Amino acid sequence: MYFTDRGIEELSSRRGEEQITFADLAGRLTEFVDLNPDFEVPIERLATWLARLDDD
């Protein structure tokens, strides 16, 4: 198990029943980067990966 898996598991257990839009997620990611600019690159990579999931 990766260290980050704990955060993912916590997210799933605390918020797993909630429904949000990608616009809501994008807003939260932007807020996170504003508060934590050192994480801009990994958040940008995650957002790009999510945006391109349907690409062949």
Image (cartoon, grey):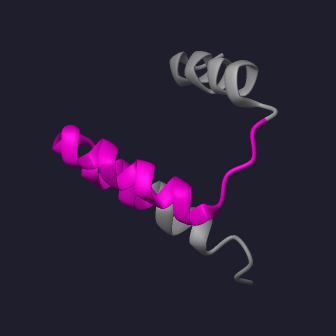
Q: Position of residue 49 (x, y in %)?
A: 56, 64
Which residue occupies the foreground of this view, 11 or 47?
A: 11
Quadrant showing the N terminus: top right
Relative to 1, does residue 34 appear above or below in the rendering? Answer: below
The quarter of the displayed image where residue 12 is located: top right
Q: Position of residue 54 (x, y in %)?
A: 74, 78
Q: What count of labels does the image hold?
A: 0
Residue at (64, 17) in percent of width and height: 10
In the image, is residue 32 part of the stretch drawn in magenta? yes
The quarter of the displayed image where residue 39 is located: top left
The residue stretch that appears in magenta: 18-45
Residue at (54, 57) in percent of width and height: 24
Relative to 23, does residue 13 appear above or below in the rendering? Answer: above
| 33 lies left or right of 12 | left
Residue at (63, 27) in percent of width and height: 8
Q: Position of residue 38 (x, y in %)?
A: 18, 41
Residue at (42, 57) in percent of width and height: 27
In the image, is residue 11 part of the stretch drawn in magenta? no
Q: Position of residue 25 (x, y in %)?
A: 53, 54
The quarter of the displayed image where residue 56 is located: bottom right
Majority secondary structure in the magenta region: helix
| 35 lies left or right of 15 | left
| 44 lies left or right of 36 | right
Relative to 54, does residue 49 appear above or below in the rendering? Answer: above
